[in-house]
Image (cartoon, grey):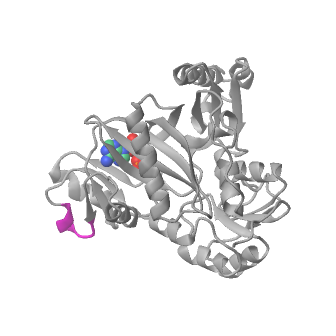
Amino acid sequence: MIRPILPGATIGVLGSGQLGRMFAIAARRMGYRVATFSPDEDTPTGQVADLEIAADYHDLDQVRQFAQGVSAVTFEFENVPAATTAACAEFAPVRPAGEVLHTTQHRIREKTFLQAAGLPVANFRIVRTEADLEGFTGILKTAGFGYDGKGQVRVKNQQDALAAWDSIGRVEAVFEEFVDFECELSVVAARSLQGDFVHYGVVENRHANHILDLTIAPAAVPQQVADEAVEIACAVLDALDVVGVLCVEFFYTKGGKLLINELAPRPHNSGHFTFDANTTSQFEQQLRAVCGLPLGSTQQLAPAAMVNLLGDVWANGEPDWIAALADPQVKLHLYGKPEARKGRKMGHITVLGETAQDAAVKALAARARLLKAVPQ
Ligand code: AMP
């Protein structure tokens, strides 16, 4: 039997953004120490971790030193090189395993894996040469390093395909059919060392400029659709042998079909509401899974909604925090990022309500109040 990693131990996090920050908050609450590794300093994770190491992911000497000082390694950032997780694995268990990251950080590997596992994805073409662009339209996406709509171009007419490929630098890509969806859904789930599976139900995600804007939990979809989404998520975590948290993002098509859009083998923006709304947040669940502890209850205590706060909220100067917090149901989360750039995720607001729709209305209203600040 693999021995659990008990409170007092240090957990290493590759990456240093808001996901690591919320993981560190959950871990410290349970008496663990946290070390974060990324190229940056004074990071969202580093500000609440016990130790912040600023080094390049390719600096394997530093990576090995980091791994020697921790009892387990997890990650909060998708684009950690495979060599980095392999170097960590020489000294500490990496959970989820580096292979999970390797599969999911590259659209061709991810889609090929899902197809081979018999799981539903939108029709796609692998693009490596000009000939691969022929006779297809949809969305052209770079195979690697894509997130929040980066490295994506919509191709409506076949004759625009070549220019689109040029615009993404003629790199390896996936050409995906355009999905006419009713809505976008996701399931955040966790799997333990022993293979136990828990999930946070099905939530609806609305995007603005390809970035998540609003999550409504639970989603207003028929029970049978929710059950199917959870079943698919369970199959994904099993097939990848995940130990940790993974989010499955779906398109729910106008024809009533569920198609997997993408996987994220870590806590996800669409699960942030669990910090305030559930017995065990997705971050505590990641900790429990990584440490080999029993998983916690995922019970949702009330319907909830989450809105993201991007740097855009600072457009008129300092947001009016007091106005947003005037509703006592509003929970404000800020990530400690010093510079509020347009499109940068700076924080989020969660609201619990009588219904998820009611929570969404209140969350959107709170965010709108933030913007009332006038230029000075
Ligand atoms: P991604 O980075 O692949 O998750 O894409 C970001 C967003 O772009 C998605 O959440 C959708 O709103 C939209 N999108 C991506 N792929 C497609 C597609 N094949 N059809 C329709 N919309 C898409």
- Tell me residue 103's x, y (percent): 45, 67
Asked which quadrant contains residue 107, the reply is bottom left
Furthest toward the front, the residue is 1
- Tell me residue 304's x, y (percent): 59, 29
Asked which quadrant contains residue 178, the reply is top left
Ligand 1: give its quadrant. Answer: top left
Residue range highlighted in magenta: 127-133
Quarter in which the C terminus is drawn: top right
From what the image shows, is residue 221 above or below residue 95? above
- Left or right: residue 265 versus residue 334 is left
Task: Please tell me how many numbered marks the rendered image carries.
Answer: 0
Residue 307 inside the magenta-drawn segment: no
Residue 129 inside the magenta-drawn segment: yes
Asked which quadrant contains residue 68, the reply is bottom right
- Tell me residue 364's x, y (percent): 56, 23
From what the image shows, is residue 257 above or below residue 62? above
- Tell me residue 363's x, y (percent): 60, 24
Residue at left offset 52%, top offset 34%: 215
- Left or right: residue 167 versus residue 272 is left
Residue at left offset 55%, top offset 20%: 361
- Left or right: residue 352 versus residue 3 is left
Residue 143 seen in the figure: yes
Which of 20 and 315 lies nearest the eye of the viewer?
20
Residue at left offset 72%, top offset 74%: 67
Residue 343 seen in the figure: no
Quarter in which the N terminus is drawn: bottom right
- Left or right: residue 77 versus residue 287 is left
Which of 189 and 130 lies nearest the eye of the viewer?
189
